[in-house]
Amino acid sequence: MHALDLDGRALVLRRIDKEPWLTHAAELIGREAEVLDRLADTPVPAPRLIAHASPRLLMTRVPGTLRLADPPLEALARTLVAIHRVDARPRTYQSWVRVTEPPEWGDHDLWRWALDAVAQPAPDYDGVFLHRDFHAGNVLFAGDEVGGVVDWVETSYGPSDLDVAHCCTNLALRNGVEAVEAFRAEYVRAGGKLAGDLYWRLLDAVGFLGSPARTGGEAALEAYVRSLRASPSRSW
């Protein structure tokens, strides 16, 4: 990402230049451009598209800063509910699970349980518009309110539980399990609907294994999966 100021306009140039994303740059940039156009007429705080030509996309700069250590969970949840209410149906979500065997560094029995769980057919779901990579690292805050949501290249159609699960895994890694449950409660309080099936939470957590974008955090990830195993599936 490169911040630019052109003719008094605050812009951002996104350039995909690293593998494995560069191989898919045309698809990713095209999808983000289409989504940003669609979001322009919605309440979702997203950048506005200026121009695009793979592997680059020029967009407006949204206000705010990252708050990774203490993200305002209420505003985060309200924004995700707004995203899930967008009337659009992009491609069906893809699983990010890349491995079939427990990691050498981890609790073999725990990860075998998690891998076996996500190897089962996905539960039925009512699909919604998904950001698919929604977490505090892709949200800019202006005070305690959301200034903008960025990084729309993975936008998909699928269960709201999956977007919530991805945000929760990231919260578990950075902020602890307490933040996870607080965010889920705020999402429901804001009007969001969750099936509560543990499958989606495990699918996202297991997807962090072997990810080229994820390094470190193994102990926190394992602690989160252990907490999921110890807790019954939620009803919300």
Image (spheres, grey):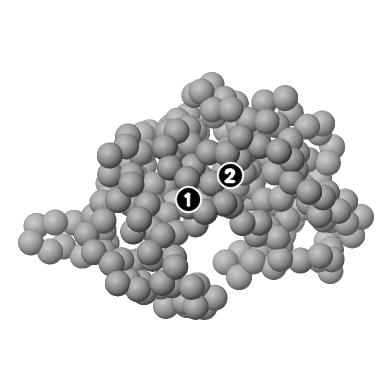
* Identity of the residue furthest to the left in this view: 7
Write the residue at 67% across / 51% down.
204
Element marked by disc 1? loop
In the image, 115: left or right of 187? right
Q: Are marks 1 and 2 in contact (CB under 8 Å)?
A: no
Write the residue at 28% across / 44% down.
40
Can residue 164 be seen in the rendering of this structure?
no
Looking at the picture, tell me which residue is in the foreground, 185 or 36: 36
The residue pinned by badge 1 equals 90
Picture quadrant where residue 43 is located: top left
Write the residue at 26% across / 51% down.
48
| Amino acid type, callout 1 | Pro
Q: Is residue 170 above or below residue 198?
A: below
Residue 146: x %, y % from top left: 36, 38
Q: Which mark, by number, is residue 199?
A: none
In the image, 71: left or right of 215? left
The residue pinned by badge 2 equals 158
Element marked by disc 2? strand
N-terminal of the pair, mark 1 or mark 2, is 1
